[in-house]
Amino acid sequence: MKALRKFSGVLISTVLLAATGVMAAPTVSANFNEQGCAYGDAKPCPANSRHHIFYYGDSMSSSATYWTNATRSDSYNNVPGWTTARTEYHGSSDVHMMLSGNGDGIPGNLSGHYSCSEIGSGRVCDHGHVRIRSSAFDALDGSERQSLLCHEIGHSVGLTHPADDGQVDNPSEFHCMTNSSAVYPPFLGTHNTGHMQDESYYN
């Protein structure tokens, strides 16, 4: 995987120690943060509903806007029960999309990063920020751009890196949420969409 294709470096600790000091086995429900925002912002927070509203900041280029819209259409609007919309009002959005020219708010040399800026009741995120490094975005082809956006938007609904939650990081199953070095489709996988349909965090 090119350095430019390293996605969000949200570090997820899933090590649970039993009273005996033995590490607990990974849960089958991995790839979604079931602990919620009450445990801090080191994990992606579940979104506050299945209607995800986007705000595109002034920094968004026409290309970033195009590929974000394509990602919304090709992945997130295709999940049964889910819809997305775009708003011109920052305060009414669930996720603020930003293209960062100097990499502000993006750790290290990552291409993108998600963080929750407003934690709501019920351990969900009422407003999050997705930042994409513009130099990295410009160096990617269309499919890679969509992979990057699909990945970071996935964090904005609470999806995690499968490997961080103890799962085998199989690109054919997890698609854009994988942190694998393999080339993978720029869309959500069945494991991802299953969580988005089944989790009780979304009202």
Image (cartoon, rainbow, N blue to C red):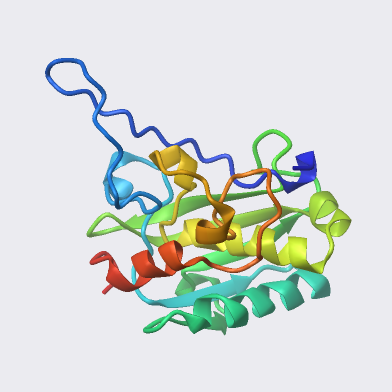
* In this rendering, position of residue 122 left or right of residue 57: left
| Foreground pick, 140 / 1 | 1
What residue lies at 67% left-to-right and 68% top-to-bottom?
A: 57
Q: In the current view of this chain or complex, which residue is farthest to the left?
A: 19
Instruction: Please indicate whether residue 36 sits to the left or right of residue 174 in the image.
Output: left
Number of callouts: 0
Is there any visible trace of residue 140 in the rendered image? yes
Residue 67 relative to residue 165: left or right: right
Q: Is residue 41 positioned above or below 130 on the image? A: above
Residue 75, position as x, y percentages in the image: 56, 75
Quadrant for the N terminus, please.
top right
Task: Name the residue: 38% across, 64% down.
Answer: 47
Residue 7: % across, % down: 64, 47
Residue at x 60%, y 64% (from the top left corner): 150
Quarter the C terminus occupies: bottom left
Where is residue 103, by image quadrant?
top right
**x and y percentages locating residue 21 in the rendered image:** 20, 15
What percent of the width, then of the height, locates residue 158?
41, 57
Relative height, residue 152 to residue 74 (above, below): above
Name the outermost residue toward the right: 139
Tell me: residue 120, above or below residue 142. above
Can residue 61 be seen by looking at this rendering?
no
Q: Nearer the viewer, residue 40 or 165?
A: 165
The residue positioned 27% from the left and 47% from the top of the image is: 35
